[in-house]
Amino acid sequence: MSNAMLIINPSSGKEEAMSYEASAIKVLQELYSSVTIRYTKQAGDARDLAQHACEQEFDALVSLGGDGTINECINGLAEQSYQPAFGFLPLGTVNDFARALQLPLDPAEAVQVLRHQHIVPVDIGRIDQTYFMNVLAIGAIAEAVYNVSPEQKSMWGPFAYVMEGTKAFRNHTPFSLTLTHDEGVWEGDVYLALVALTNSVGGIESLAPQAEIHDGCFHVFIVKQLGITNVAQMIPELLQGNLSHHQDIEYFTTTKLHAHTDEKHIVNIDGDEGRPLPFSAAVLPHELRMFVPPDDQ
């Protein structure tokens, strides 16, 4: 007898999550003998439910919610002795993880991916005792996104982050950062540091085209200079997937990272406020089993 759990966050996607509930249940009932439906009520519920799905050895876990709900599920699944295969319907603002997995961004299309039962191993990251799926960001521009309200997200989508980042850019100042990685230590003044697990950051899928969902490493980008002129130069490089070659960018890959600064900065974890530096992070290779579209689609 096969079983699946569906976790629904009723407030996700401008409260559109409930409109996809029936189609998600229908597909899961066609695939599994038993389908358990659970609704989140407060922060932490999705994490606890995902952990319960591991303990009860469900065959599949599917999340219907935004980026925060997906992140909670990953924190419940990570490093468990048993894990169900994991899938989700993207209802977030940017949906970087969905983009990296090549999932349809339309939830009605994404639910059909489950029918193929195509499962691949996917890396995630661990920062201290918290798990993440996409990116760590350090610097004033990264911290500016904390000022984006739910209303701004609903009205402007990903552009809301751009607007707040632009405000921070006007008052940008460099800070001293030390990064200890696999090959040694990088130290210097930076404006922004990105530690990416996937090719998509902030909805831009060309940031790190060389990054794959199961390559076992972080892709680190350090922005050493930031001004009107070099930003204008960086944009074409970024869109062409060549940002790592820009003269004002330091780029390297690593499986683990320790970040330290004497200044007060808070790391941005998957778009949300994280914790003050210093921090230690590591890649957990092939940690999740994810439902993704077949290779021929």
Image (cartoon, rainbow, N blue to C red):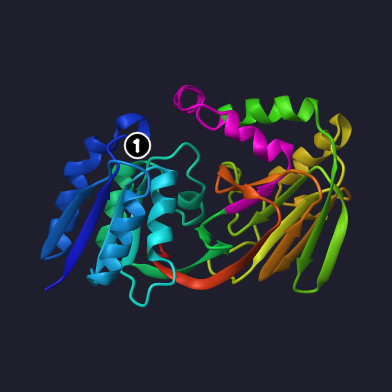
Image location (x, y in percent) of residue 136 = 63, 52
Name the residue at 57% across, 42% down: 273
Above or below 99: residue 289: below
Pick the front one: 77 or 130: 130
The N terminus appears in which quarter of the rendering?
A: bottom left
Pick the front one: 248 or 11: 11
Most frequent secondary structure within the magenta stretch: helix
Residue 101 in sight from this viewpoint: yes
Marks counted in the figure total 1
Residue 78 falls left or right of residue 107: right
Pick the front one: 7 or 76: 76
Residue 145 falls left or right of residue 8: right
Residue 263 falls left or right of residue 74: right
Residue 206 in sight from this viewpoint: no
Mark 1 is surrounded, within 10 Å at the Cα level, by few (under 14), some (14 to 19) or many (20 or more) other residues, namely many
Image location (x, y in percent) of residue 194 = 69, 51
Question: Which element carries disc 1, helix, strand or loop?
Answer: helix
Name the residue at 84% across, 67% down: 185
Name the residue at 61% across, 34% down: 145
The part of the chain drawn in magenta is 135-159
Q: Amino acid at mark 1?
A: Ser
Q: Which residue is mark 1?
A: 12
The C terminus appears in which quarter of the rendering?
A: bottom left
User: Residue 144 lies in magenta, yes or no?
Assistant: yes
Image location (x, y in percent) of residue 254 = 70, 69
User: Residue 213 lies in magenta, yes or no?
Assistant: no
Res 258 → quadrant: bottom right
Res 244 → quadrant: bottom right
